[in-house]
Amino acid sequence: MSEPEKNPDEIRGGRNLVLLGVLSVLIALTTSLISLYIYHTSGDIYLDCSMPEADCPSAHSNSEENKTDNSYKFSDSGDITDKVLDEYLKEFNSASEKLRKVNAPFGEEPLSDESLGI
Amino acid sequence: MKRKFLALFISLFIFSYFSVFPVFAEETTTISEEKLSNIETNCASIKESLKRTQNADRNTRISLGRTYQSLLTDFITPLNVRLMKNNLFDSNLADLQTDFSYDRDFFNQNYINYSKEFEELLSIDCKTSPKDFYSQLQKTRQERENVSSSARILLNDVSDFSQAVTDYTTWFKEYKK
């Protein structure tokens, strides 16, 4: 008993389907690699908060720090009065205090010969 | 005449070549034998210490970056927009906003450069190539100094802005009288 011969159109259709699948995978791989390359060379990788090793509270919507950070936002509409300016200045100085708390950021000590034991 | 023209042409060529492609003397790193030996011996602990520093730096950058962003979008920009809407535009405050935004981008770029040098440093095997490692360490230190200096600049920008708002408030109270 010999198998019934397949229609040539069916065979071609099957091949085209496989070709389409392979091409789609290749295109997806190529574009992903290009994206990763750009992500790395542009330096965005170093500023990314979603990296697992980055302890970045903004990446976690429920973090306490996020809640407190968003507590004050100066509105860009409304009147300007003495009171508004005084309150603004108070809040601005309080928010900028966080920068002063970071003592000498990126100081030379951690990379010095002594610290590294060289 | 032809020779003079040729000499002039050659000298112009040499001049333009060195103007376009500046020649740098190769950087020579002087490092004592003792230090090379220390790098080889303590290679593992040095790498460990560097990784700790890298993590600490990442968190410092994130903390600073979020504060810079918050100051710009929650305070500096809305104030200038609101002043403009009330026809009380102040060019000094607007200039300070531009400076802050520019300096923040500069900080980010410096941090990216520093991180790239740091990655390069971590990729060098300090046991087999201590000299290359030390040379890269010096480059990384230089980039770190650039990041540190741009953080100082941003802190000054914030102080300047705070002072400018104080001055503006004083002027405004007089103006309203």
Image: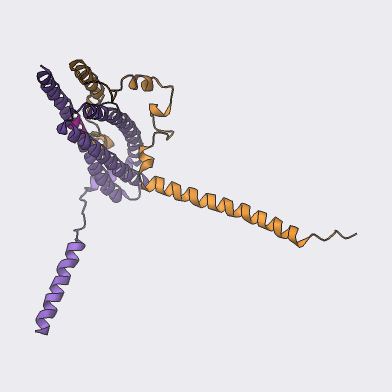
Chain colours: A orange, B purple
Can you say whether B64 is above or below A35 in the image?
A: above
Asked if one can make out residue B114 in the rendered structure from this viewpoint, the answer is yes
Q: Position of residue A26 (x, y in %)?
A: 55, 53
Whether residue A50 sits left or right of residue B94 in the image: it is: right
**Within the magenta stretch, is there residue B166?**
no
Q: Quadrant of residue A45?
A: top left
Out of B75 and B2, give the one closest to the viewer: B75
Whether residue B128 sits left or right of residue B15 in the image: it is: right
Q: Position of residue A23 (x, y in %)?
A: 58, 55
* x 30%, y 29%: residue: B73
Q: Position of residue A102 (x, y in %)?
A: 25, 26
Asked if one can make out residue A108 in the rendered structure from this viewpoint, the answer is no
Furthest-right residue in view? A1
Whether residue B155 sits left or right of residue A51 in the image: it is: left
Can you say whether A37 is above or below B59 in the image?
A: below
Looking at the magenta stretch, what is its main secondary structure?
A: helix
Out of B35 and B10, give the one closest to the viewer: B10
Question: Which quadrant holds the C terminus of chain B?
Answer: top left
Out of B76 and A5, give the one closest to the viewer: B76
Q: Position of residue B117 (x, y in %)?
A: 31, 45
* Magenta-colored span: B154-158
* x 76%, y 62%: residue: A8
Q: How many marks?
A: 0
Q: Quadrant of residue B45?
A: top left
